[in-house]
Image (spheres, helix red, strand yellow):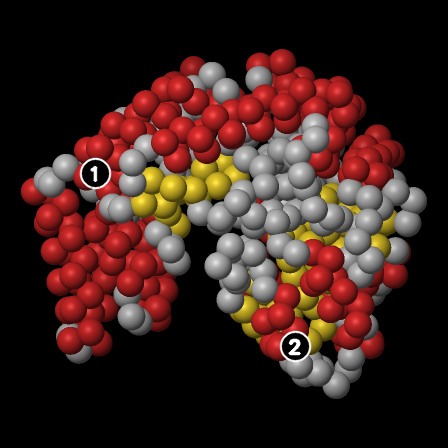
């Protein structure tokens, strides 16, 4: 039955009940079962966030004139963030809805900078280590910049030599991450920024996941190499408040060394019949709640509060790291700098399936295959349970099982087929695979190892793209 626009409303209690039912099969992040997507700092902080968000629930950050409150919050959030990231005083910035918007805005500013200062660069190019977030590719698509991916080193960190070699006269922006999302390692920012300085181009540091963590990690005495505006040549940064800033979702900052670059990111339209229109980033209407809640949590916790949270997170991450390494067959990739890491090993996707059976949600990664862990404050209470289940999962994944033999055979057969079959058939196969992958959690979820194994090794990435598009379409349908 197609879903139609409701003719009549429903009682409030019924609406809420339907929503409670809808979330029953959601990942149980409240019990620390999710290792991505949700960042928890405890009931206390959650309570404050909800109160602050609700207080500014109706306000709209699009107009700083109508809401001086939001203007103050945003200006102070940006100033506090700049101070934390080595840019006090000379750093300009804006709040955005998240890491993606921060990155899009920074790349847009770089594109505008290139039009002024490198008009012959057509199209302008940016160098991305293989580990850089796909938001940069999104920006490339949206803004007509050419994204050039550069392989990372054996330690999964960006390779400045390779980046140097990939530079062309059209290169206008080089990117590094602190840390990268996939393996949680910090790229050699000083070398990358020096390359930018040498060539007189821009350098963006993506500190989306690390921006509100690494400064505190360093203060606690852990080694953290330079990565922020204290490094000469770094011209812009992104840092997500809704990750380790523990703010409500919809909050990030994009920061620029100096006001000129920010001015290039601003959008101004003077000739609309609706009036003069201006905005600092991609969005129009901006939720006041997200801005207010970010200000509230920073002001409430202060450095001392963040240090306390960070201490617990680092101890938990260390415990998990040691625990993983003590499990036969499993290892951590590279040398993660904080609390983001990747677990690799034999049959790692099968380990992921076994963990899913035990109620843990971990993202699958590729090149090389691994499971992703983002450890946050809420995981302190469940780290022991997780390690116990992980050990059991690893053991179960080593045991020969019919399902796994079938999975392995499927991957082999799948890959062989994809190479041999005519394109039309492969597309049909992929459509079917899409149905398999899109199967609702609960039934389909258990056995995804074969699919992930196949996705990683598919020779034709174009087919994979079609498969993912099929999935997106399928998931957007109302049931
Ligand atoms: C999360 C993340 C992003 C994207 O941020 P969103 O808030 O999901 O849009 C970009 N870069 C890195 C390193 C990240 O961890």
Q: CA distance from mark 1 to mark 2?
A: 44 Å
At a point 82% along the width and 44% down the height, the residue shown is 86
Q: From this view, report whether residue 34 is shown above or below residue 90.
A: above
Query: Which residue ends up furthest to the left in the rendered image?
Result: 402
Which quadrant of the view contains residue 103?
bottom right
Q: Nearer the viewer, residue 369 or 411?
A: 369
Q: From this view, report whether residue 267 is shown above or below residue 171.
A: above
Q: Is residue 269 left or right of residue 245?
A: right
Instruction: Point out the tag, 1 or 2, that comes first from the N-terminus.
Output: 2
The quadrant the N terminus occupies is top left
Q: Tell me where residue 445 appears, x and y as whole percent.
A: 25, 38
The quadrant the C terminus occupies is top left
At a point 44% along the width and 31% down the height, the residue shown is 322
At a point 66% along the width and 34% down the height, the residue shown is 222
Q: Tell me where residue 468 appears, x and y as whole percent.
A: 35, 58
Q: Is mark 2 within 8 Å of ligand 1?
A: no
Q: Tell me where residue 49 appears, x and y as whole percent.
A: 65, 22
Q: Tell me where residue 265 appears, x and y as whole percent.
A: 77, 60
Q: Which class describes the residues within 10 Å of circle 1: few (<14), some (14-19), or many (20+)?
A: many
Q: Is residue 192 at all visible to an observer of this figure?
A: yes
Residue marked by disc 2: 167
Mark identifier at residue 311: none
Q: Is residue 333 left or right of residue 219?
A: left
């Amino acid at each position: 039955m197609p879903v139609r626009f409701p003719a009549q409303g429903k009682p409030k209690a019924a609406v809420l009940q339907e929503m409670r039912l809808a979330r029953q099969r959601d990942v149980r992040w409240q019990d620390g079962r999710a290792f991505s997507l949700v960042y928890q700092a405890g009931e206390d902080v959650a309570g404050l966030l909800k109160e602050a968000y609700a207080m500014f629930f109706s306000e709209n950050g699009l107009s700083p004139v109508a809401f001086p409150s939001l203007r103050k919050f945003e200006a102070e959030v940006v100033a506090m963030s700049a101070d934390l990231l080595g840019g006090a005083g000379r750093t300009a910035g804006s709040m955005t809805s998240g890491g993606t918007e921060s990155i899009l805005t920074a790349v847009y500013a770089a594109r505008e900078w290139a039009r002024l200062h490198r008009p012959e660069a057509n199209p302008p190019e940016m160098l991305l280590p293989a580990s850089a977030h796909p938001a940069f590719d999104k920006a490339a698509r949206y803004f007509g910049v050419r994204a050039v991916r550069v392989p990372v080193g054996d330690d999964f960190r960006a390779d400045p030599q390779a980046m140097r070699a990939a530079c062309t006269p059209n290169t206008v922006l080089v990117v590094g991450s602190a840390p990268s999302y996939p393996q949680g390692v910090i790229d050699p920012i000083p070398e990358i920024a020096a390359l930018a300085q040498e060539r007189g181009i821009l350098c963006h540091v993506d500190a989306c996941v690390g921006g509100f963590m690494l400064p505190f990690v360093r203060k606690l005495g852990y080694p953290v190499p330079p990565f922020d505006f204290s490094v000469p040549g770094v011209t812009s940064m992104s840092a997500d408040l809704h990750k380790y800033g523990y703010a409500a979702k919809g909050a990030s900052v994009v920061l620029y060394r100096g006001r000129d670059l920010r001015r290039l990111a601003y959008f101004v339209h003077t000739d609309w019949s609706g009036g003069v229109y201006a905005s600092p980033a991609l969005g129009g209407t901006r939720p006041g709640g997200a801005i207010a809640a970010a200000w509230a949590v920073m002001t409430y916790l202060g450095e001392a509060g963040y240090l306390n949270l960070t201490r617990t997170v680092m101890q938990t991450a260390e415990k998990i790291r040691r625990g993983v390494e003590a499990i036969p067959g499993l290892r951590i990739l590279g040398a993660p700098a904080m609390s983001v890491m990747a677990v690799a090993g034999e049959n790692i996707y099968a380990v992921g399936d076994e963990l899913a059976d035990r109620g843990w949600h971990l993202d699958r990664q590729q090149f090389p295959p691994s499971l992703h862990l983002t450890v946050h404050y809420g995981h302190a209470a469940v780290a022991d349970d997780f390690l116990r289940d992980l050990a059991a999962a690893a053991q179960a994944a080593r045991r020969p099982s019919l399902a796994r033999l079938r999975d392995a055979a499927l991957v082999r057969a799948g890959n062989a087929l994809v190479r041999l079959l005519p394109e039309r058939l492969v597309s049909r196969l992929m459509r079917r695979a899409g149905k398999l992958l899109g199967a609702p959690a609960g039934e389909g979820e258990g056995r995804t190892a074969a699919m992930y194994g196949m996705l990683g090794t598919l020779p034709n990435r174009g087919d994979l793209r079609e498969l993912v598009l099929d999935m997106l379409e399928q998931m957007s349908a109302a049931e």
